[in-house]
Image (cartoon, coloured by chain):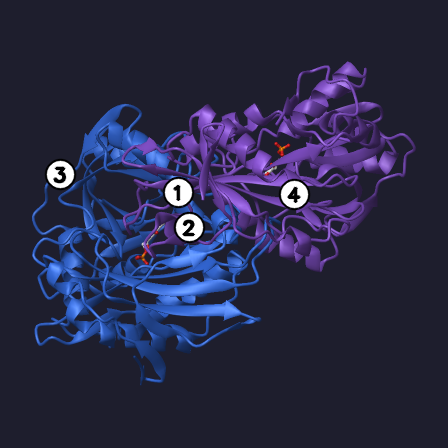
Chain colours: A purple, B blue
Amino acid sequence: METMVNNISVEKATTSKINEVDFDNLSFGSVYTDHMLVCDYVNGAWQSPKVVPYQPISLDPSAKIFHYGQSIFEGMKAYKDESGKTWLFRPLENHKRLNKSAQRLAIPELPESHFMDGLTTLLQVEQDWIPQNPGSSLYIRPFMLASGKGFHASPADEYKFIIACAPSGAYFSGKVKVLIEEKYSRAANGGVGYAKAGGNYAGQFYPTQLAIEKGYHQVIWTDDNTHEYIEEAGAMNIFVRINDTLITGPTSDRILDGITRKSILQIAENQGIATEVRKISVSEVVAAAKNGSLKEMFGAGTAAVVSPIAAFGYKDTDYELPELENSYASQLKKYITDVQYNRSEDKFGWRYPV
Amino acid sequence: METMVNNISVEKATTSKINEVDFDNLSFGSVYTDHMLVCDYVNGAWQSPKVVPYQPISLDPSAKIFHYGQSIFEGMKAYKDESGKTWLFRPLENHKRLNKSAQRLAIPELPESHFMDGLTTLLQVEQDWIPQNPGSSLYIRPFMLASGKGFHASPADEYKFIIACAPSGAYFSGKVKVLIEEKYSRAANGGVGYAKAGGNYAGQFYPTQLAIEKGYHQVIWTDDNTHEYIEEAGAMNIFVRINDTLITGPTSDRILDGITRKSILQIAENQGIATEVRKISVSEVVAAAKNGSLKEMFGAGTAAVVSPIAAFGYKDTDYELPELENSYASQLKKYITDVQYNRSEDKFGWRYPV
Ligand SMILES: Cc1ncc(COP(=O)(O)O)c(C=O)c1O
Ligand SMILES: Cc1ncc(COP(=O)(O)O)c(C=O)c1O
């Protein structure tokens, strides 16, 4: 049965899976809600988005997604406050970045209203799925894929935009040990590293598996030419605190312009923490680790929020980070999650009601 | 109804689309045969491949192919000789390269027998689809995709290996005009450029569209660091003839180790053509174009065979290549296609009967 909600067609699932879910023990992104948003690009235009029951996607074997990796995605979260009201965090930034990725991957850009109306309608339908437990949220995955057919290596003529949701707990359990990469790389100059293109992630799996086998959780990528500069991690931008200055690398065409990263820079400045946006060399970090001026390293991203790094490995040596009371990481994490969960004033206008 | 052919289960399509196809006017890779091969990786092992009717692939919205571009492919052709017998060209090389790509993309490697038995059985079932018209062949597309679920950016636990086929004509119609790229790039040092990873291709679409808008057919990629060295084209390795020497760049972790490329090097050496495998700088090519020593440029790949380049653009200038009688490109193309279509002796043992 189809109804209209906010001008979006909604076809409700006949049964719900929600009672099968243990909301007290959520892993990350592995159970999916009852509905999804689907929007098709056909005949040169994005059609009306629809909320439909969560269901398999059926594509011709020649669909270009299968052959040429023409796909992009976003990662967002919906947060429920103590009164049960739902909030998003800077969702228009995700829409803008989706379209930046779309352009680089030769995918037609999606109008803002398709994105925002589709998203908020889906979240209204799925409101019971948004966890209220501390540290949990509804992870939201908007993605676009080339459904058009053909073995010719050229852009597809049809696409699908989909939003699926997964109630989720923490991305990392505990502190993170990272390996600074010396051989493999994630992105080329003039490449697609700044886009959330699917292929950027598959390329990281093998080097990351090698790092995991050595006892690390995650690779820190360095520039592909010299491997001398720290760029970012799998799904996080990287911050380094040397003495009392918080440093992060500049964005470039190799690095994703993270929304958490730029929010943290703004919060830090507002809190009177000295910040620098500049290239960070591995030798600087190693020297600072040796002389004790390296106080903290942490990753920042929607999924991982602010994830303190306990140690990093480089050229067969491990460097431990000190355990600080009242670290920048914990201060900044508290600040940002307090905004996200509507526990504090929203000075920057980042909260968005659903 | 299921039967066993060469120990492979074959489920025949109940109707055929073959009468709808105009074999005299085939484009490239846009009509598909009646059957496909499907092989699933589940519970830690590749299961038995099966020939089934060509049909949509149905995947969960959280399948990792949609999010992380975990996919690889190959490109091959089946050639029918005058007596109606079908041949492949160095198919074991495709299997080896598929597994090289699989390793880099953290996909489990496929046993040779699954590949070869599946492929030859599919081609036996589809033998009426293999064109006999000159210049036409059956384009074969083996591919693997991550069907396993999850929004965590890590390798999938389930995969599909599929072979689909498309009777095809020429990839390019006529001579090709290329643009030497100065800004965008295709591959990073330490990246996945040497693998046939889906994401490598989507990343090329936008820069290639920009080149097409300027009147070119194809981009010639240069190294991402200096843009001073010619690497390869979208789906072809590149050869340059300066005076009477045939030059191609060395393979690296940025460049696909093309089967056509290495076959051409071997043919050229055997024919007494001087060859060099070394870095080719753009300035050398431009200088040679200016002083008249640049005789030919051509692309080499399974889809495009040997494709002469008529002109190249660089820094807003176009350089025309001369029209030669008895060019290396035409000699080499004749040699390789004579082997492929069983019109000549197979000195190197490259032909493979189906
Ligand atoms: C490569 C990469 N870097 C950084 C980030 C962090 O970006 P954001 O804070 O917008 O989630 C992500 C995740 O989205 C990512 O995939
Ligand atoms: C990037 C790239 N380079 C070169 C080639 C040519 O390789 P092959 O001769 O094995 O078809 C291809 C096509 O397979 C390709 O995709």
Instruction: Give the camera-side residue of B68 and A56.
Output: A56
Question: Where does the image place residue A218, in percent across and percent down from the top left?
Answer: 69, 48
Instruction: Give the amino acid type for the residue marked by disc 2 in the picture.
Output: Gly
- For label 3, the residue is B322
What is the crowding at mark 4: few (fewer than 14 residues within 10 Å), some, or many (at least 20)?
many
* Mark 3, secondary structure of its residue: loop
Q: Foreground residue, B174 or A91? A: A91
Disc 1: which residue: B202
Query: What's under tag 1, amino acid-wise?
Result: Ala
Q: Residues within 10 Å of mark 3 (few under 14, many from 20)?
A: some
Query: Horizontal placement of A234 versus B244: left or right?
Result: right
Quarter of the N terminus of chain B within the rendering: bottom left
Q: Residue at x 84, y 23 (%)?
A: A244
Is there a contact, CB below 8 Å, between mark 1 and mark 2?
Answer: yes
Label 3: chain? B
Chain containing mark 2: B
Up-down: is B191 above or below A251?
Answer: below
* Label 4 chain ID: A
Q: Is mark 2 within 8 Å of ligand 2?
A: no
Q: Are marks 1 and 2 on the same chain?
A: yes
Name the secondary structure under disc 1: helix
Up-down: is B324 above or below A246?
below
Gap in Å between the C-alphas at discs 3 and 4? 67 Å
Q: CA distance from mark 3 to mark 2?
A: 35 Å
Residue A221 percent location from the top left of the image: 63, 41
**Mark nearer the N terminus (1 vs 3):** 1
Disc 4 marks which residue? A129
Q: Residue at x 63, y 41 (%)?
A: A139
